Structures are given as structure tokens and as C-alpha cells.
Amino acid sequence: MAGQQADGGFGVHPYSKWKGAHWRLVSLIELGVPRTSLEANRAADHVLDWIATPDEPLVLAGRERRHTSMEGNALAVCCRLGKHRDRRVRHLVTVLLRSQWPDGGWNCDRNPEATHSSFHESLAPIWGLVEYHGATKDARAREAAEAAVELLLQHELFKSRQTGAPINPEWMHIHWPHYWHYDFFHGLRAVGMLGRAGDSRAAAALEHLHGLRRPDGTWRATGRRYWSRDAEAVDWGDAHQVITPAAER
């Protein structure tokens, strides 16, 4: 939280990659910042003032095109901080429920011919909606998250339904921080949030995870680094200190 300013931000746009309040909060929540943290709550208000501002939805071919990883991450963070009753947080839920695609996920693709949801844009909404349901018992949030998880499971979390091969080879690595990017590991975490890790369609991803465990018992980031030291608030290294406990849950 070093460098936090009077408005709760850090001197850059809340979404600035990767030092904006939006991204710092995601990392802080993953690291277990207490919900009573005044600094974290000030940063969350700063993010909400930005992201919960009503806008005109972009609808093409009957589907809303939206970067819902933004709303998803913000929703999860705010629920963890106990802000689920805030009208701005409820607005995020409304946006996610409204913009969900028929196959269960979300997508920002402006190509009118795009009809399949993006795993990248669907990952954070699952987290956010699960957290919101946990805080409020809102059945609609749970149902929306379950529909998105079903989409992931239909692909066994990483496979093309046409060829059975990985949709993207990069998805077979672990990334930390992953920000808005999808990979099999964070797909497993999303499935686990709804108690679905035991589904037979998650078995291949679980086997792959076990295969990535190091002889010393740890898991480490093996994929592309989406961050750089000059663009992040901290040096994550291989992040084994946070990945290993996450993998063991």
C-alpha cells in the first residue's frame, strides 16, 4: 500500500497495469489482507467510484460485449472486504447477470460473429459471483457462477471440444499473478470454489497439476510473466510461496 494517496488510489488510473488500485487489491486479497484494513477499503472505494459508474452497454448480435474481468475482480475484492451491501457493488452484480452469454460465460469480442464466451473474461466473474453469493446468499449469483463453471468443465478446463488438444499451450502453465489471463490452474481454482473439483471432467487438469509439483513439494509459476518489475508494485519471482498453498487447497 506504499504510495497510497488521499483519494485511495496510487497516483495512476485504478486499472493502470499493474500498479493501479484495482490490481493491487486483487493481490492483497489473495495474500489475505484483513477486511478491516482502512487502506484496502479506501482503495476499494477508489475502484468502485470508477468501475461502478453506469455506462451504455455495447450489444452486438444480441450479446453484450464487455471486459467483465474488471467487474468480476472488483466484485470479489469488495465482497471480501465486507462491502457487499454497497449500492455500487450491487451494480456490478447487475452488470454481470445482464451481460452473461447463453453458453454461460462472458466476452468482450466486438466481432458480431463471435458466439463463444472467452475463458479470460469468464474467470474473474466466477470468483466475484461466488464471493457475492457467499456474502448475501443471492441465488442468481450462484446460478450464474455455476453456468460459467459448467462452460469450463465442458472443455475439461483446457481442451478444444473438437480436437481434444489444449486450446492454448500457454494455458498449461501456472501464472502468478495472472491478472485477467486464464490458465488451467486458475480454472481449477474457479471450479473448486463451487465444490466441483471432483467432477470427472476436471480429472485431466488435476493430473496435470500433480505432474507440475516439484521434488521439494512446491508449485511455481512456469508460464509467461505477464508482469515486469518496473510495472508491478512487488517482485513476485516464481511465486511459490503463494502458489503452493493455493494448489494444496
Image: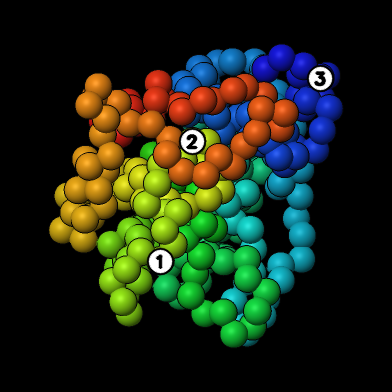
Q: Residue shown at 63%/71% (left/top)?
A: 109
Query: Which quadrant of the structure image shows residue 25?
Result: top right
Residue tagged 2: 176
Looking at the image, residue 35 sits to the left or right of residue 47; the answer is: left
* Location of residue 79 in the rendering, given as x and y in whole percent from the top left corner: 51, 35
Most distant residue in the front direction: 215
Q: Residue at x 32, y 47 (%)?
A: 188
Q: Earlier in the sequence, mark 2 or mark 3?
A: 3
Mark 2–mark 3 contact, CB under 8 Å?
A: no
Q: Nearer the viewer, residue 186 or 226?
A: 226
- Badge 1 is on which residue? 167
**79 to 165, vertically: above or below:** above
Q: Is residue 130 left or right of residue 195?
A: right
Please indicate, yes or no, whether residue 110 appears anywhere in the rendered image.
yes
> Label 2's element?
loop
Quadrant the C terminus occupies: top left
The type of residue carrying mark 3 is Gln
Residue plotted at (75% across, 55% down): 54
Q: Nearer the viewer, residue 85 or 249?
A: 249
**Which element carries disc 1, helix, strand or loop?**
loop
Q: CA distance from mark 1 to mark 2?
A: 20 Å
Check disc 3 and report the residue beneath it: 5
